[in-house]
Amino acid sequence: MASKGWQHPYVNIFKHVKVEDWKRSAKEGDVSTYKDKRLKCSVFRIRGPVPANSFIRVPKGGGQSLGLVGRYFYLLFRPAAGKHFVAQLDVSVEDGQVVRISFSNMFKEFKFTATSLQFPFLCGAAKDSVYENTAKSARRGFVGPAPTSVRWTCLMLDLQYIVSVYLNRCYSQLKSIKLCANMAVKNMFTSNLLLNPGVSFSEAKMMGLASSQGTGPIPRDMSFPVPEGGSWHDLYDHIRFPSEGTKLPFHSIQKGHLQPGANCVSNQRIGEESSGASLSKPVKDRVSLIQQITSPNSLLRNRTRMVTDVPDLGVVSTRLNDDWLFRDGGQHQKEPACSSSQSSPNGPPWDTDYGGVHVHIHAEDGFGKHEEESQEESVCTPVPDDVHLSLSEEPRQKKLLPDPILRLSRIIGFGGATTKCALWSSLGDAVVYPCHAIIVSMKISSNQQRFFIGHTDKVSALAFNGNTTLLASAQTGNHSVVRVWNYHEGNCLAMFRIHAHSLSSLSFSYGGGVLCGVGKDSHNKTMVVVWNTSNVGKGGEVTILAKAHTDVDIITMKVAFFDDTRMVSCGRGNIRLWRVRNGTLRSCPVDLGEYHSLDFTDVTFEEGNSSNQHLEERTLFASSRSGFIFEIDYSRVVIGNVRRLLPAQQQHANHREKLTFNTGRGIAINSISVSSSFCFTGSEDGFLRLWPHDFSTVFLEAEHEGPVSLVSVSPDGLQVLAATSAGSLGFLDVSSRGYNTLMRSHTDTVLGFSVDGIRRHLTTASSDGTVRIWNMDSLHQLYDFVSEDEPSSVAFHPREQLLSCGFSSGIVRVLDVSSAKMLAEHKHHRGDVVGLAFSPDGEFMYSADSQGSLALYNASEDDHNVVRVVCNALARGTERAPDALAVSSDSRCLAFVGPSEHVVTVADSRSLEELLHVDVSILDVHSPSLDSALRVCFPPASTEHLLVATSANKILRVSTKTGRLLREVSKVHKHQCSSLAVSEDSRFLLTAGHNALKVWDYDMQVHISSQMFIGHSQPIRQVSFTPDQLAVVSVGDAIFLWDFLAHPVDSLTDSRSPLRSGSISALRSVQPDVGGVQLSNGMPRLTAPLPSSPPPRLDAIGTLGRVEQALRSPSVGDDTSTSRTASVPGSGSSSDPRPASFLQVTELANPSSVNTSHKDAAEMKGKKPARPDCYRHFAPRFNTSTLDQAAVAPPPGEEGIKLKAVIGYSGNGRGNMVWSADQGLFAYSCGCVVVVEFLHTGSQRHLQGHSEEISCLAVTNDAKIVASAAGGRNGSRSLICIWDIQNATCRDTVSHHRGAVQSLAFSWDDRFFLSAGDFSDPEVALWSTKTFKLLSSVRMSGPIHDTAFSPSRASQLACVGSHGVSFCLMHAHGLDVDLKVEQVKTPVELGDVELTALCYHMDSFLFTATNRGHVGVWDVNTRRCLMTWEADEGEIGVLLCRGNRLLTGSNTRWLRLWEVGALRGIRPQEKNCHVEDSGTTVVLGQEMMLDGAAVSAAFDNSMDMGIVGTTAGTLWCINWCDNSSIRLVSGHKTEVNDAVFSEDEGHFATCSEDGSVRVWSVPSNELVVQFQVLSRACGCVCWSPSSSKERARVAAGYSDGTLRIFRLSSSEMEMKLHPHQVAVTAVQYSAAGDVILSAGKNGLVAVSSAVHGATIRVIKDHKGAPITSMQCVKEQCQNLGLQGNEMWLAASADRRVSVWAADWSKDKCDLLDWLTFPAPAYFGDDGPPPSLAAFWPADPDLVVYTGYGVEKELCFYSLARKQIMKKITLPDWAACFSLSRKSPLIAVGSKERVLKVIEATSGRFQDFLQHSDSLRACHFSPSGTLLFTVAFNEILLWEVQGL
């Protein structure tokens, strides 16, 4: 049976049958229409001498039925004066029997049979007429013809009550209606709601009454008009049957005498028999029996509480009323129950003695096919004084649960109508601002939002009273509405209209007793209204104190905080002072004199002035668009001072001066705010400026992206709020000079969005021309892409960090979000891109345009090549944007509307071949118009269904196999459905229509199938569930994020896993709401296997290896309230920290509060210099990690592990390698370590003192001292370390440069050394090598690239850079040394070049190189360039001269040796000449190509042999004699992803992002072989279990989903497998080596044969979450209850660990256990820490786990006991960890660069700080004697000694 939900809240019967067409209705006799003067509308008039001969019958035929199930029948009619009328209603009861109910003023008495009921109708009379007096005296109406003063009547019949009481039957439905002469009829309708026609919508809204409670008004199109000031009950009659009066005859229909204010009626006790009529005994007996069964002993009162507070417009739900009960001695008794499923609930009598329930809207629609219904949608509001409803214990009708199912959580947006409204709370801890129709209060510390919902249009003004207890708000529109709120409680205290439009300004008095508003009246004149709000907090009314109309322009108006009756205003050409006196509002203008034409923008008093300050001392500040600031003497109403603010001009390189007072164009000031210490201005140029009160200078300024429209100082004067017209809101902390951005927003309609569920990012496209990416947890904007053409649709790749954007020009662009680069651009579309989608498997991308074209792309390639384009595939037009395409969850089908608007097409997603056509226009044969499709959507859980939203406000569920219509939903919204989505479990349907949002029960298994939610002020463009199904996103005017509160499915058991559903409750019990933060796994997951055993007990204390209290350090506190429960003993003030510390076993603690505030650094007075565009200039590697300051390294000699070898060379450095051929010193840098290597033995010594990446090195001529430099962090200065090579100790450290150090150099006599800063601080510093004190420094005019001392004169040095050549000369004055600098520009013949390198040749020549490959020769004495030649095609970064040989190295990878002996005879020329013109010959002797650009070089004195470092991370030994090169040191250039030992520890393998797999020998650490795969990143690597070199293999996983098997003995690739379609994240050989387990980024685990490479099986239990770690061990599983000879585990990013028992020889693999670890929502921008798990080597029954969770800890889980046995607390989240097989040691690496080695039994640990970046991997060798750690491309090998 079809659902009857469409009949709610009412059915307009005339409209339903289209009575005017007379096709579904019939008329007979004299039936006509006329316009009634009272009702002011057309009505039907039925006349005739015999009533039965003139009638209207609905429906037309006798065999037809209306099928209306509404309990109450409403008839709007007027009997003809002096005439009789008859009305007949045919109703059916539960068994299908038809009963006729008739009423007429012809009937003299009540009559009944088994199939008929006849009621006499007693007509009422007009008020105060003689007929009314007669009727009152007779306590009854007129029997017989209607009196001449008969009035229009609203008659209500309770059909269910009538049938149950008089016939003892159960009412089913209303079949037909016949209205006979003589009467006039407006309309009739049925409803399940008991409505009051005497209450208007505005009165109901003010009193908090709702139709859903039976106290609201009837629909507008059914209401009778009432003139202004009139009373409904004085003009019309309202008749209810049964009557509300207990003494009226129950068997007659007539008017009762309750007061007009009565809002609802209950089912009353049937009265005694009336004297005016007789009743037969059988009827008396039946009525008496029914009375005993149904009537209560004490009737409930029917009066509603008077609500003084105006209700908020809140959550709206579409649901019907439950059954209403009466109470009898504490027992609940139902009214006569009906067996029919269609029975309707009773009316709503209630008991006002109970507390509150929230009241929801009754929507008009539901599921079920019908032809017509009302277009009305009711909107009701929560009642502040709650009314408790009596509910049945077992309601007969189910509803959608929970109720409400959505909760507005967060809004991304600011402004709407204005960006000039934002307020501070009194404590300065929150900011209140409008977002379209919603007011948001945001905590600035946590970004937590709460909302004030009630406005129906955009909010245009806000105002607080002095202590911020009252908040006033106004909305735009022709008739502006003002609301007054209780700010702390969040409820609306009053609502009133102002008969004005464009209300632009509100201001509260300090005490909150006066509110002032400014708007425009109907004549477009400025109107000022002052209200009395002193009683609003006590429930009193708001009255108007004064009102004025004026032609004066008013931009803003404010009430003086020291006097409620005084106001100030400003506008174009005026500043006025106002005062209210004796109910009159008067104003006094300030005499502006010559400034009378200025455009004033803001006016304010000094904040924080005492209210008892004398009036004479008040100063008023006003700002203008021309830059003038006025100080006005308030008491004398005269101008005190006028100052003009002028913009600063760039007159010199780094010096800004202010123009004179009367010159130039002033700063356009939009807003001004004044505190006791400063003045703050916001201007059109985007600057927030801080001034002293005399505006003499700028103390501080912060630049914004757009004009600053508002500034407001906080109550304490320490923070300044700034809003911009570009939609951003933030505040400046004056004391710290830090700027916090609270909110950014689109400035126009949001057209569409897409969600990245893995990274919890949200991207939106807007009409403002931007595509933005937001963090869904912190609400911060991460990226902003601006385009010339308007974006129309966006889509995230399902796995990769890729974003696709479609534009109105037809262009489709694919962007790499992480690098902010465009990967592909396609221009084949001719119209707006209306649809954009990726297939769920990420293989393909689709786009569609408004001209009907459809394109298919290959998304597995970076360039997203076009596979196929189909023209005229889609229906043309833009109305289906942005989601015109739908892809099925299995990536096989693509659906869209086309080729015409009436057809829906399902196509093959890989070829675009058409599979099915569905014509939606022929599905409804009764529809008078052709239906067209608007939206299509595949339910994720079923690919056999397709949902189609149509233009007739229907949703069709169609079979994708046959095209058959499965279900139809009508009247989904009042307007057309603009978007729809289905939850992943297909339990809920989400729809959007206009500005309303609805959630439906997808299967329609409940009678009340939907709930409606409002909040948007503009049409919603798109809605969707988030991938984790925990939220809903809707966009339109702003971005709304709703919490989705639906309960999870009761059974999620995977049929493939032998799991029981009985442990569901246990699983949920381990996921509490910790500290009020909702726990979320943050990953899209359709189903999750459940553990077959109890979940981990996270509060268990250690039972294995229990740590005794005696081992705890006294300095380690026992307070577990914070996430860090362990500290380093003695690390505070002790200078000799103990080498061992302890980590404790602790119980679960409350997580520390998460601060989601995001700080954007505002530019303060000047812009940062740009980095030069040349590779020679050092650029630190991008590094977001920070060193854990609490970590303390162990004392020398007491380390548990010792650094044995550093593998690799930092090719990112510049000049970071030194070699002395005479002394045999060879040193280079890798990360933050200086490696001193002895070439004859291969051993290393490590100099450790830096924490950041080393940029350059320098060595003295005697090779005894090496200097190294590394940049600082967070504005700290660079550190230069001076090392004693012989003792390997740091001799001294110096700091001077604020940026990185670009170059270091020692003088030839080693008395001085030189340091040069990078582009951010281009300063040359001269130091003494004796005292290491700074002697002198000089700042250059541009970036410095290289420096050098003269080889023979210690007092001469030179440097080159963007400015040219700088010749420096030292002058000593006692102990003081000065540097005299002479700068010489580059010869003009070379063009616009930068000098990148230099070196001296003999005493008189200087070689320089350029970024265009030229080498220049300079005369040191004359400072002139003698000649140049082109030595290379690219940039030269290395110059080195020995004797008559010159070495050049460039970014073209060429190393060239030049013979320059002929330069000795060169003579100075008048101008620079080229080498061909000079007559001097420079000969290219030899050249060699290396593997990268040269960054460092050192050669012997003859230039025959030397060492060169390249950007590829290689150090080459160059021998020019035989033109050979030997690789000395090799390392990875890009990030290293893994490093693992072979089983025999004879080799280790590394893999990198550049696609290389390298195998190294141990202990020489030399590169044995390198396997390179181009354009593919290698993410993981593992060794085969065999230790034999002949059988040893290396398996590597790549980003394209392939596995490659390399044989070590032959150095060849043995096999290539392709088991995955996505990147491989983990790979492991089985313990026996016969199979290979690999895991993909999509969570799928593939089991492949190691012999033939075939995929044996695919395990999908972790689908949707990337696998982060995997391990296999050889272990018998019988003791754990399963058969198998080995175990393996996999951990995924959603904090789930699966443990499996396997016997691959028998093809057996069974799930042993499933672990789930809870965690709060993650608020970081870089993704949560990985989930890591491994078997404990000493006992594989234990699984060690760490990952993001409630606490930072290591958990030891017992597979046998099914519980956590032990926990070790960590100070930082673990990024990697490894377990030693030899000893109970655990190595843990963190993003904070700390390697922590922990002794598991005692908790003892040590910290090691040798890495300069976040640790990526760490692995113990099989014997446990060695340890590898990896951070970016730094590979460190440690020797394990034990703690």
Image (cartoon, rainbow, N blue to C red):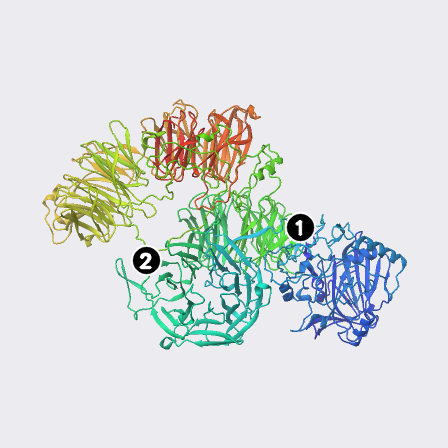
**x, y (%) of residue 1146?**
49, 35
Mark pair 2, 1: CA separation:
61 Å
- From the image, tell me which residue sits under label 1: 399
Which residue sits at x=40%, y=60%?
A: 706
Dot 2 or dot 1: first in sequence order is 1
Q: Secondary structure at mark 2?
A: loop
Residue count near mark 1 (Cα–Cα under 10 Å), binned few <14, some 14–19, many ≥20: many
Q: Quadrant of residue 186?
A: bottom right
Q: Quadrant of residue 115?
A: bottom right
**x, y (%) of residue 1366?**
19, 50
Of residue 1005 and residue 1226, the one placed in the foreground of this image is: 1226
- From the image, tell me which residue sits under label 2: 1165
User: On screen, 1149 above or below 1164?
Assistant: above
Q: Secondary structure at mark 1?
A: loop
> Which amino acid type corresponds to the residue marked 1 in the rendered image?
Lys
> Which amino acid type corresponds to the residue marked 2 in the rendered image?
Lys
Outermost right residue:
281
927 left or right of 904?
Answer: right
